Image (spheres, coloured by chain):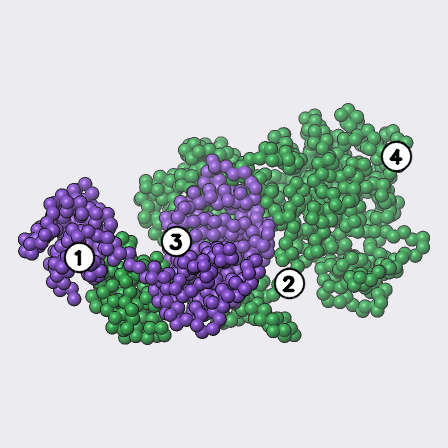
């Protein structure tokens, strides 16, 4: 019972980005503090600001915004209204204006009309900015996928930012984007009105990772679990040198994960898999869990697909590889079949199939995207004569062949023959 | 109805039956009686009035020569001293509200005084529905219990007012005035006045003009000081120990201080036989008087003068009650209006906006602070805008001296509906807020329930003030550095308008963003506006359009049409009307139409495929009777050249270029905004302006950088204060003074101008670093910017294996590549192309080598760079 509870708690923590990013709330240099200071200032000084949050995906930009807004909402309960837009949904200016009007109406219990024209909506937005500015209310626009708003004429951004520099309003525009050059995408008259505050989200340092792990994995004492169990669980994670966080093996695993990608959500995914595989009998995390999770993490999907491929399909792949080695740049099904026939002639293999069978195998490969058409031009052509390309590297093919025990020796030989290693 | 007409008429006729029930003499008439008893011809020099040097705002002098006391003699003085403008016109009935000689007006005074009892009683008896607030009604409305919600009061208060008026209006027209002299005092629309509240409460002579000392209970004498807490006045010499001069800053009297400490305080009781009298201010603040703002003044057909007033309320009367940050002299303006007879007016008071209030040091005792408007239906607050006032003034000037009521019942009804409607009935007819109609009334709801404390009682540091001054939205009083251009624009517009027939002309203004194009034009228009008001220039209509704010270029017709005629129409219809007006206008029609100045911002956005919109707009001014002036603003210099020849020829040759600001100009702009604040080091400003001038010459950018720098400095200061507080060293908390230095400007500049890619490269994962280095290597080897994934992967794997790193799998590498592509450090095709995916560095390879040369995690990278 306790173990299930603990597992559920750990999972819900990992599932909630706000909890994960709350780790860095206290440190002064964190983005959380900076952003909070910026927004707080624009609320208390009643001024307008525009901020750009940049950073790779999974670095917690939106989570930090959420945390900050949550905090501010508790501090100033009725003087903040948040408008959220997403570039993927609202990159069309008219839609975006409508959505803004809708959310504003919802926030202030006004009646919203779907029929209003986009001019009306724009006017309404500006009026609201003014009215809210007069009544000390801040409107915070969170524009996720900001780069997608910076397409076309950028009417939305222009009218928003222009209103902010003329009307006595109190608004903050927070642009969130993973493109580092997002502000360069703005048209110059829009850029000139943008106030260019930038916050950069970078992967956490090693100490921060450590703090993050502790923050997530330690069980709290006051949620109704047996205190003995909690103590045991926590001591297992880190008590002395033999325990998980100090284990050399664990450090290596962590290192290899950070080697590839240090973003927080990457780490969280790794942890989630490890926590999910926790055994319910002992109720404790063990190093094995983390090892298993790391194995999953290291999987290479392309090579794994090769394991399920039939012998004939392997023949076709090898043939295509041979063709490429012969520096034949453009080939289609027919030329592959010619090569296949030639191999059959030369080595007298037992695997001789008819063209129609080969075509079906060929189609299978196309479906699995191990091979692909060169371009989309020849849509109406039949498959046989459309030029194709191998989408798997010789190295991966080599690994695939080697891992297959049932692979005919002739194929290995054919492949080795082609001067790869 | 008939009874009412009669009573109203009776006021002008001397023969009025005396009703025995009359008990309460109305205050106004009594006062005029006292006025006449004192000798009106000899002005009494106010010697006895206490002189106080006002140090802080609240310690205002009680006797300033211009003070608004209405001592009878003073009234006289003022009256005769200032030349009076008689504003009423068409008053043929003989009884003019203002006569040049004050005595004449005063003469009926005593007789009025004699009559007063009857009129008062009659009012309460025979006209229960009269717009005058009769005592019992008043008690209903504002019985002085602050807990009652104002809404209830107001709804139950004076409903029958309006129907009355409608009837009377249909009979004869009302005459509206801007200014009325009533009982020797000039009342103007927009003035604030005290209004009578409960007639029976205190008789008139108790109304005190000069405050008494709280200790000796004598008025006048020497200097008095005002307590900032209870607003009581004290003679300096009566205090214990006596003060020699007025202290700096806030001063709180001993009684208040003791009360704050929780002691039981016994205020000195007045000497026997002397009644405690209160000034109008005190009465107002204790709910015994009302204050209101005059919205309009008119004379009824029967000769009585009425005013429409907008009530002020004291904080106690709002739904939230007095908040701790409320000032003692604070009032709220409500959105509740009533019609009141002039009789109720006592005298002037002054509700000022914060700025005027802080400047008005000597304005006397009747000065109040009014920053917010209170919505009586929704119980919320809203700041009062200055713009609001400006508009009202404009209207006033436009429509000459006299406001003749145009019989537009609909308008009045609408207004009344808006004001009288209770929230419940508003909800019933609610219109969607985001359509045009709904915006007028729907947005009343927006407002804050309680005024947040942080906006009020906060002492701003210099840095915080500087941040406020540097805001783009805070418009400076004057615009430095663009005088020449502004003169040119002024000359252009003036030349185009002033002629007898307005020549249609075009002006094209171009310049990079942030060089003050729109701002200059707007400020020119403001200046011209004041010229129009002064009568030196023909009135004109000004239409401002922004090309980027139009949903489509064609919508411009709609907007122009709406601005010119006030009607909404589809763009095709609007185009038709506009063509009619501009193309086929005859001479006769021209005189009806004022010249129109059309400002089109972001002109280049109006380009359509066949350029018909621009053609039309630029074609109209060339028509003989169009009366149209077009000012186009855009960024590009060669816009006219890009247009079709027939359009560019119509655009004319008048161009005006706004060059980028030089660093001296930027410096001037920044320092003029910061004028007296000691928040920036001079070199810091110069550094910022030089940098910006070198990059773009964009004033917005320069201001934003300075603001950002101030923010950074502020952040550092606050953090250091916090850490100091936690350390416990409190002594030097406030002494530290932070100024914006070069380092802060540098940090701000970096944030604005530097792309963050270097930092991202430095902090990215090790594999991505290897990936980037491999890209650079590939670039050096082949000399081609573009490579594909297969080649790159082999390079990466060979690099890894030769440096004893575990070679990554292809799919992992793919993932890393796509991630770099997402943040646009490299440009790449979509990942489905796998090994054929094309890759390219998005930044110069030097940036990569700079970022990764001395990487501590992977020292071996350096040898590949």
In percent of the image, x 36 and y 53: which residue is there?
B637
Q: Circle 2 marks a residue in which chain?
A: B
- Disc sitting over residue A407 in the figure: 1
User: In front: B61, or A382?
Assistant: A382
Give the letter of the green chain: B
Same chain letter for marks 2 and 3: no
**Residue B249 in the figure: left or right of residue A118:** right
User: In front: B420, or B368?
Assistant: B420
> In this rendering, which labeled residue sits more in front, label 1 or label 3?
1
Label 2 to label 3: alpha-carbon separation: 40 Å
Element class at badge 4: loop
Q: Which residue is mark 4?
A: B22
Q: Quadrant of residue A178?
A: bottom left
Q: Circle 4 marks a residue in which chain?
A: B
* Residue B180, x across and y down, in percent: 72, 41
Q: Which residue is mark 2?
A: B459
> In this rendering, which labeled residue sits more in front, label 2 or label 1?
1
In percent of the image, x 84 and y 35: which residue is there?
B120
Q: Circle 1 marks a residue in which chain?
A: A
Q: Circle 3 marks a residue in which chain?
A: A
N-term-proximal mark, 2 vs 4: 4
- Disc sitting over residue A242 in the figure: none
Callout 3 crowding tier (Cα within 10 Å): few <14, some 14–19, many ≥20? many
């Amino acid at each position: 019972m306790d173990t299930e509870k603990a597992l559920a708690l750990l999972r819900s923590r990992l599932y909630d980005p706000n909890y994960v990013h709350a780790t860095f709330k206290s440190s002064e240099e964190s983005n959380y503090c900076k952003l909070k200071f910026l927004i707080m200032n624009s609320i208390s000084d009643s001024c307008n600001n525009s901020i750009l949050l940049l950073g790779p995906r999974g670095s917690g930009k939106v989570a930090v915004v959420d945390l900050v807004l949550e905090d501010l909402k508790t501090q100033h309960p009725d003087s903040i209204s948040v408008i959220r837009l997403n570039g993927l949904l609202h990159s069309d200016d008219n839609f975006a204006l409508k959505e803004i009007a809708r959310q504003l109406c919802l926030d202030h219990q006004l009646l919203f009309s779907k029929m209003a024209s986009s001019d009306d909506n724009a006017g309404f937005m500006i009026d609201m900015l003014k009215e809210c500015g007069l009544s000390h209310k801040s409107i915070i626009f969170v524009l996720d996928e900001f780069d997608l708003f910076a397409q076309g004429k950028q009417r939305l951004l222009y009218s928003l930012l222009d209103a902010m520099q003329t009307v006595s309003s109190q608004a903050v525009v927070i642009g969130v984007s993973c493109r580092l050059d997002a502000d360069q995408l703005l048209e110059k008259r829009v850029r000139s009105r943008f106030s260019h505050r930038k916050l950069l989200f970078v992967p956490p340092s090693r100490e921060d990772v450590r703090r993050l792990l502790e923050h997530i994995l330690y069980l709290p004492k006051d949620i109704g679990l047996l205190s003995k169990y909690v103590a045991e669980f926590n001591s297992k994670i880190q008590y002395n040198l033999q325990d998980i966080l100090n284990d050399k093996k664990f450090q290596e695993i962590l290192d290899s994960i950070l080697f590839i990608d240090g973003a927080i959500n990457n780490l969280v995914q790794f942890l989630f898999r490890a926590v999910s595989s926790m055994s319910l009998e002992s109720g404790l995390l063990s190093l094995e869990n983390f090892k298993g999770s790391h194995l999953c993490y290291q999987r290479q999907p392309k090579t794994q697909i090769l394991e399920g491929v039939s012998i004939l399909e392997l023949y076709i792949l090898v043939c295509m590889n041979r063709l490429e080695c012969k520096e034949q740049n453009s080939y289609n099904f027919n030329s592959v079949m010619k090569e296949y026939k030639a191999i059959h002639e030369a080595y007298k293999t037992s695997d001789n199939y008819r063209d129609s069978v080969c075509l079906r195998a060929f189609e299978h490969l196309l479906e699995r995207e191990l091979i692909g058409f060169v371009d989309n031009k020849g849509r109406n052509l039949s498959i046989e004569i459309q030029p194709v390309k191998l989408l798997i590297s010789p190295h991966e093919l080599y690994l695939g062949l080697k891992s297959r025990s049932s692979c005919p020796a002739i194929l290995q030989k054919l492949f080795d023959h082609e001067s790869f290693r | 109805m008939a009874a009412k007409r009669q009573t109203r008429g009776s006021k002008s006729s001397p023969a009025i039956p005396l009703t025995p029930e009359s008990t309460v003499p109305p205050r106004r008439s009594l006062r005029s009686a006292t006025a006449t008893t004192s000798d009106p011809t000899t002005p009494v020099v106010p010697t006895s009035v206490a002189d106080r040097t006002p140090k802080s705002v609240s310690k205002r002098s009680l006797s300033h020569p211009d003070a608004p006391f209405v001592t009878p003699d003073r009234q006289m003085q003022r009256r005769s001293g200032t030349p009076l403008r008689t504003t009423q016109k068409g008053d043929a009935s003989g009884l003019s509200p203002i006569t040049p000689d004050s005595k004449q007006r005063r003469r009926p005074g005593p007789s009025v005084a004699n009559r007063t009892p009857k009129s008062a009683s009659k009012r309460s008896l025979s006209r229960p529905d009269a717009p005058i607030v009769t005592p019992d009604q008043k008690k209903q409305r504002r019985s002085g219990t602050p807990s009652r919600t104002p809404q209830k009061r107001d709804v139950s208060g004076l409903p029958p007012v309006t129907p009355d008026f409608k009837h009377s209006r249909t009979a004869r027209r009302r005459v509206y005035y801007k200014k009325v002299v009533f009982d020797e005092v000039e009342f103007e629309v927009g003035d604030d006045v005290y209004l009578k509240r409960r007639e029976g409460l205190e008789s008139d002579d108790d109304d005190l003009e000069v405050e008494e000392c709280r200790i000796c209970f004598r008025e006048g004498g020497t200097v008095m000081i005002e307590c900032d807490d209870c607003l009581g006045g004290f003679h300096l010499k009566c205090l214990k120990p006596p003060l020699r001069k007025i202290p700096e800053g806030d001063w709180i009297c001993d009684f208040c201080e003791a009360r704050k400490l929780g002691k039981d305080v016994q205020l000195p009781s007045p000497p026997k036989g002397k009644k405690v009298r209160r000034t109008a201010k005190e009465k107002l603040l204790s709910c015994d008087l009302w204050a209101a703002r005059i919205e309009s003044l008119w004379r009824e057909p029967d000769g009585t003068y009425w005013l429409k007033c907008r009530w002020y309320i004291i904080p106690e009367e709002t739904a939230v009650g007095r908040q701790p940050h409320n000032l003692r002299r604070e009032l709220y303006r409500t959105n509740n209006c009533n019609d009141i007879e002039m009789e109720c007016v006592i005298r002037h008071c002054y509700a000022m906006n914060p700025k005027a209030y802080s400047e008005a040091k000597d304005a006397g005792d009747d000065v109040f602070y009014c920053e917010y408007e209170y919505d009586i239906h929704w119980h919320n607050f809203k700041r009062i805008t200055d713009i609001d006032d400006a508009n009202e003034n404009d209207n006033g000037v436009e429509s000459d001296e006299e406001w003749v009521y145009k019989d537009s019942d609909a308008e009045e009804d609408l207004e009344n509906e808006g004001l009288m409607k209770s929230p419940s009935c508003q909800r019933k007819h609610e219109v969607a807020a985001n359509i045009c109609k709904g915006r007028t009334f729907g947005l009343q709801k927006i407002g804050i329930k309680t005024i947040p404390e942080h906006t009020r009682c906060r002492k701003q540091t210099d840095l915080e003030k500087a941040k406020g001054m540097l805001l783009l939205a805070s418009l400076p009083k004057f615009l430095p550095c663009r005088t020449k251009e502004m003169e040119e624009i002024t000359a252009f517009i003036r030349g185009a308008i002033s002629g007898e027939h307005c020549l249609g002309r075009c002006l094209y203004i171009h310049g990079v963003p942030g060089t003050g194009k729109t701002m200059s034009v707007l400020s020119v228009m403001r200046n011209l506006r004041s010229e129009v008001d002064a009568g030196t220039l023909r009135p004109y209509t000004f239409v401002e359009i922004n090309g980027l704010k139009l949903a489509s270029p064609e919508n411009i017709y709609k907007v122009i049409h709406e601005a010119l005629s006030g009607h909404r129409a589809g763009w095709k219809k609007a185009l038709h009307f506009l063509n009619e007006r501009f193309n086929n206008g005859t001479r006769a029609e021209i005189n009806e139409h004022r010249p129109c100045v059309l400002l089109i911002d972001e002109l280049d956005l109006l380009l359509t495929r066949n350029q018909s919109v621009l053609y039309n707009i630029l074609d109209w001014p060339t028509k003989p009777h169009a009366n149209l002036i077009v000012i186009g603003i855009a960024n590009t210099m060669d816009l006219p050249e890009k247009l079709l020849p027939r359009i560019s020829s119509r655009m004319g040759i008048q161009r005006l270029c706004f060059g980028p600001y030089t660093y001296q100009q930027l410096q001037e702009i920044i320092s003029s905004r910061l004028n007296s604040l000691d928040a920036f080091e001079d070199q810091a400003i110069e550094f910022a302006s030089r940098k910006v001038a070198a990059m773009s010459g964009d004033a917005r950018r320069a201001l934003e950088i300075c603001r950002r720098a101030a923010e950074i400095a502020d952040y550092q200061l606050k953090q250091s204060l916090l850490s100091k507080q936690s350390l416990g060293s409190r002594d030097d908390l406030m002494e530290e003074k932070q100024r914006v230095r070069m380092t802060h400007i540098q940090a701000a500049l970096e944030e604005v101008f530097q792309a963050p890619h270097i930092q991202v490269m430095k902090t990215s994962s090790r594999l991505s670093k290897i990936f980037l280095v491999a890209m650079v290597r590939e670039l050096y080897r082949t000399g081609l910017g573009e490579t594909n994934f297969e080649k790159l992967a082999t390079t990466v794997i060979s690099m890894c294996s030769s440096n004893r790193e575990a070679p990554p799998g292809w799919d992992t590498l793919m993932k890393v590549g796509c991630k770099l592509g997402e943040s646009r450090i490299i440009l790449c095709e979509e990942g489905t192309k796998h090994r054929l995916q094309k890759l390219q560095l998005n930044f110069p390879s030097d940036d990569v080598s700079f970022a990764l040369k001395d990487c501590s995690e992977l020292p071996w990278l350096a040898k590949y760079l």
